[in-house]
Image (tube, grey):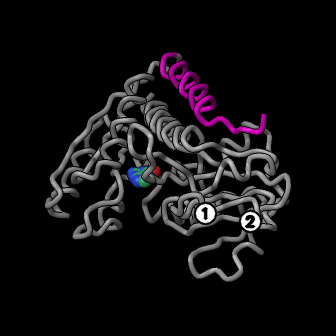
Amino acid sequence: MNIIDGKYVSNIIKEELSERIIIENINPGLGIILVGNRPDSKIYVNMKKKSCSKIGIKNFDVTLPENVSEEDVINEVEKMNNNNEIHGILIQLPLPKHINEQNVLSKVLLEKDVDGFHVQNIGNLALNRLNNCFAPCTPTGCIELLKRYNIQIEGKNVVILGRSNIVGMPLSFLFLHNNATVTICHSKTKNLKEVTQRADILVAACGRPNLITKDYIKNECVIIDVGINKIQCDNEKGYQIVGDVNFKDVIDKVKMITPVPGGVGPMTIAMLLTHTVEACSKINNKNN
Ligand code: GUN
């Protein structure tokens, strides 16, 4: 079978975390801030809350209206910074346009930055000083999947499509630190196919439904599809979730591939839970 099953791996990680919470006798808590009414953000936050409850992490969630001021969002962050029951803080992105995301993210206490979006944590990631901080969850989940499937990273040509602050940029650092040769492609890249055809590992994180077809890849390529795109179709729901890769077209040519859904998505949540437990465990060890 050439499927990299993120749902399966994430369930194993969740079981490991449940056990760890019991063995270490800790009470991890995650603060979640959701601003506005984006349906996709609401779905993601609900999935995160449900996963927390399932493994024994307490949620502290706050929902703020679309027109809330930047100052009021920062106030909520500061309350969570000062709450001893909260060990990790997640601010669901994107925030409404009138709020400067960096201003808000940089108010999160470094040791509670389980999303790894604080400017200082991005710096630590770039310098490979991750002992005391967290890398963003989706990139960490991609690397964790490759490691759990024993797919070698060192020495491989890795091509990443997309340079976002949440996925492409931080993931490029993680691959570099794992000794891969990394190329990042984006909307201005010339001769994209020529670049992607050189990839031993191709990560698609550009938000373009079904962009990657078999003519973009070489035989036996490993594909990590980070895309989550809603497209119209004539099933009962009227829509379907697809990745940035045309799964059916490439499946017979790839060595391994993550499906959408059930690939990277569940791993993002598993990494958030891991970071929250880790943050709680560290504080607990410091206090004992
Ligand atoms: N929006 C899209 N992906 C993410 C993520 O990993 N974390 C947060 N906080 N917001 C997101």
Q: Residue at x 36, y 62 (%)?
A: 106
For the C terminus, the image quarter is top left
Please give the residue where the numbered disc 2 appears in the rendered image: 216
Discs 1, 2 touching: Cβ within 8 Å: yes
Coordinates of residue 19 in the picture (x, y in percent): 54, 18
Q: Quadrant of residue 206?
A: bottom right
**Is 220 left or right of 270, judged from the image as shown?**
right
Q: Which residue reaches farthest front?
A: 234
Which amino acid lies under the numbered mark 1 shown in the image of this protein?
Leu
* Mark 2 beta carbon near ligand 1 (under 8 Å): no
Of the pair 7 and 85, the residue shown nearer to us: 7
- Is-magenta flag for residue 209? no
For the N terminus, the image quarter is top right
Relative vertical location of residue 270 with respect to residue 175 in this rendering, above or below? above
**Is 262 left or right of 115, judged from the image as shown?**
right
Which amino acid lies under the numbered mark 2 shown in the image of this protein?
Tyr
Secondary structure of the residue carrying numbered label 1: loop
Relative vertical location of residue 117 with respect to residue 235 in this rendering, above or below? below
Of the pair 107 and 241, the residue shown nearer to us: 241
Can residue 142 be seen in this snapshot? Answer: yes
Relative vertical location of residue 255 with respect to residue 244 in this rendering, above or below? above
Q: Residue at x 22, y 58 (%)?
A: 74
Coordinates of residue 267 in the picture (x, y in percent): 56, 40
Pointer 1 or 2: first along the chain: 1
Please give the residue where the numbered disc 1 appears in the rendered image: 211
Q: Which residues are magenta?
A: 1-22
Coordinates of residue 272 in the picture (x, y in percent): 47, 41
- Is-magenta flag for residue 6? yes
